[in-house]
Image (tube, helix red, strand yellow):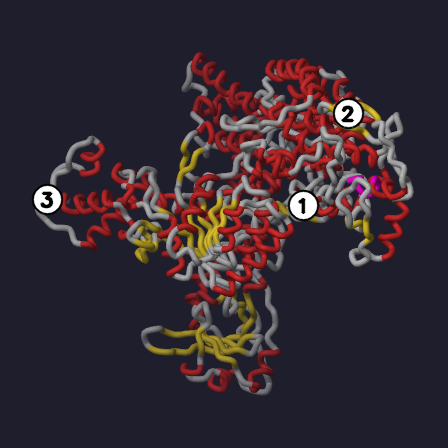
Amino acid sequence: RNMLYASDSGFEVSGVGPSIMDNIYAVVFDEFHYMNDRERGTVWEESVIISPKRTLLVALSATMRNVDEVRAWFSEVHGATELVVSSFRPVPLDFAYCNRDGLFALTSQRLGSAGRNMINPKVCSTDVLKAAKMRVEHRGIAGDWDDDVRKGKKPRRGNRKASPAEIAKEIDYMFEEGMRKGRMLKVMNARPSNQEIPSYGYLTRCLRKRSMLPAIVFIFSRDGCDRAAGMIAEGEHSDLLTEEEAKLVDEKVSAFETAHPGLIGEDKLRLARKGISSHHAGLLPIWKSVVEELFQDGLIKVVFATETLAAGINMPARTTAISSLSKRAGADGIVELSTSEVFQMAGRAGRRGKDKRGTCVFLRSQFEGAETAYNIINQDVEALNSTFAATFGMVLNLLKRRNLDESKELVEKSFGAFLMRKGRQERLGGRGAMSDAEMFVEAKKLLETAPLDEVSRLAKLSNRLRTEQKVLKKLAQINLLNQIADREQILPFVPVGTKAIIVQRDADTTCLNVQKVELETHLFQGRSDSLWKPLVEYAVVLGNVEINPESGEFTAVLTQSNEIRLLLNEHFVHIDVEGETLKWDKVDPKEWKTRFVPPRGHFEFSSTDQMYYASNDESRGLADLIPEIKFPPVPGHLLAQKDLMEGVRQKLSENLLYDRKDRRDLVKAFKAVKKLKKQFTVEQLRSVERKMDKLSVQEESNWKVFMSAAEALQEFGFLTEDHQVTELGSLGASLRSSNELWISMVLLSDSISELQPPQLAGLISVLLAEGARRDQVITFQADPETLEAVEDIRPLYSNLETAQRKKKLDIVITLDESDAGMVEAWAKGIEWSELMRGTSLQEGDVCRRLRRVMDMLRQIPRLPVLSEAIKLNARRAIHLMDRFPVADDVTYVVRSSKVEDSSETEDGTSDEEYIFSVVNAQDTDGSMDPIDPEELTPSVAEELDLLDFVPSGPGLNGGDFATSEEEFDDEEDEEDEEDNDEDSDVLYEEDDGGFNGPSSENDSSGDESIVTNAAVA
């Protein structure tokens, strides 16, 4: 999306240049159903709408119901689109169910009336089994059993005893009835008892016993994942690895532990050595990548993961298990999993090339049993909806190259607008749920756009054309049936040597279909082409052959391909009885049948039940003489009717409204008004009209939001009165965030220019905060300068919040300083372990929040309008934050500006000197905190020429360095020497959390100048 906006607007957007789309051939949208995502789905829609027509778009999804609507939308906004549907799965998927009694197949081999496998009675709850038993035994007693249950009555019991087979059949009926009526019986929703819920240890033992590991167990809370992994490790049979596998895991885990001592807790390392792990957003990304690698190698046997693992991570397993079929969904409370969500998780089961089948296991949970699981997997997946939402960045980027009308046309291409238009058209056409009154109002409004007398003539001519077309089709049908009947009569008397057109041996069609195609293309399309030719071949009649008295006579023919066929009337398309018979001087026609047609036992049957025999070389000469013949001419009465039809079509094309795209809708509207005008009072129609106007407002909501956003941008100087993008607007157009206007306003404020780089990072976190959780603890305090800047921008926040509220804009605007102190601490060089001791947040959450700040900082140096001082501070902040494990060269690589591109501040301090002063700021006792080159990510260390220095002394203060010649070649060493020529001796010292100018200490010695430049990172 950023690439498209950069190419479309001419701006650099989020670091992407305008020429980036020039050489893009295709764009592939994997997991396209994520267009339903509330927050990110609009990005998918924008990408489809704005993509140039020359770019091939490919959308992939395994869980999308309304594929025809999506295809039609693609066709409308991007061009001709082909729908490719496949049910093939490389590894077939089975469903199983686990309770305290064991692991069972969820479905049986019995097929219901809808063709689906029915539920396995062994997994049904006790309540369902009792209900089915009572229903069987209740048969024959007055009253409906289902009604008794729903009304709370105790069902009466019969005198017969139900057999297991009858109970199983009754369960099938109960489920089919429930699905047909869209509801389940009351007994099927009964909560299972805790005695039926299996432990994770029991599940693991069942899977191991059946060789169904490795497995992913989905649990919908991070704590639940961690607790489950711990329970497995502490229980019996926790050794899931062979001796050789355990050795390999230990080597890899030990290597990670040696490279990053203390980074991951001992409990997680111990679990991994046993082949067990958790996987969720609270873990460090670098550790999750290790878990994924071990799992793919088959060295982690059980992973307890949240549902995020089902989206986009390449971790297929032999088995997946779903612990519950409901989850907590924020303000919505406990919600049942959707069918799409279940299939996304289930789809991880089955490794291509390793497993013959994959299995998804549903666990008996506190709230759901096997009945719920069976219902979910037999429901349709969710339909794709639109989440399109106009943002400030979208408005600015579209108006940069388009006027308002062109922008409106593009906004109205959203999937939501397409669905509304489609629904309105279907209702107007009588295929939807629009009432007669609504149809009347809608039709009347449409008729107001055209002269009524012309609409009347258009409707009459359209009806006349339709009538003449029906007459012609009926006459053509009668003509075809007459031809077949005539052929039935003359076939026994056709002379030997008569030329014929027959249906191809394996063509899945009949003579009637071929003749119909030929005749209709001639009559209704005004041309006689060869659409039917691939379906036929040419032959010569050899005579009639009787196979047996019951089947009657067949007509033997020889084809151009030198095959003998025994045919019935239905295989002949045309017999040329009026033309000359075929002559062959080598063999007399009277002998053709006896010479060329073998006994019945030599014939084979084709896929269309034609009897054929590959003839010998003797008949080849005759086959070569068989010509291609033409169909008989179209009868005169059909041609006359065709001329009549074309005359009406000509008059229709001369109508003044013929060129309107909605002329068919005009005709429908005219008929609707004519039919319904006497059925409603004026008051009824006015009421319906008000309702329809409200619907129209809803349909135009996207454009209304777009214009409201444009008005807000005008209010703050980002757009002119005539909707031209201003210089300030170019800044918002180049940004990528949830609220580009808000971020731009803050970056342009005076207070931000006074902040030092760590404080700038802290302030950026204030604009991006996810919101403090109730149990969140962060002990770090932001600098006073940062908090003062927050107070300075609070009026901006209030002004924008008021403007958005007045214009009913639901665009996120954030001002939350809860993360600022933590971000500043990381930017000032605090150790990761110390950072984590100062917060209750999980490691993954801290890492994600720091990365979000870095992502925004990386945009700032490339933005227009901003001062060079802010860009310089942003670049310095990136360098300060670009440390392991937040950046790790595996899951997150920072490609910040090279040091040689940096500039100096007004007092002459370079980037290198500034960063060195922050990293090695004095402690309270006057000592310097040394920097460890091993803690730097290679991307930053390489930029700052530090990799080829290895400390040999106790620290950076006066310590010596030895050059490592083994790591880099001579060319890199020469580059390092050139970069280190400039000594820097101006430092900043940290005092009371602020930066107070040059230090009184000057480092002028040769060795220490090398140290200074080496420690720049």
Q: Position of residue 935 (x, y in %)?
A: 70, 44
What residue is shown with label 2? 995
Amino acid type at mark 3: Gly
Of labels 3 and 1, earlier in sequence is 3
Q: In which quarter of the image is the N terminus?
A: top right
Instruction: Provide the secondary structure element on which disc 1 rests.
Output: loop
Residue 406 is one of the magenta-drawn residues:
no
Q: Where is residue 349 in the image (x, y as percent from the top left)?
A: 47, 54
Amino acid type at mark 1: Asp
Within 10 angstroms of label 1, few (less than 14), some, or many (20 or more) residues? some
Q: What is the quadrant of residue 997 in the picture?
A: top right
* Nearest to viewer (mark 2 / mark 3): 2
Q: Give the range drawn in magenta.
A: 1012-1017
Q: Please give the label number shown on residue 285.
A: none
Amino acid type at mark 2: Phe
Q: Please give the label number shown on residue 158.
A: 3
Q: Please give the label number shown on residue 888.
A: 1
* Nearest to viewer (mark 3 / mark 1): 1
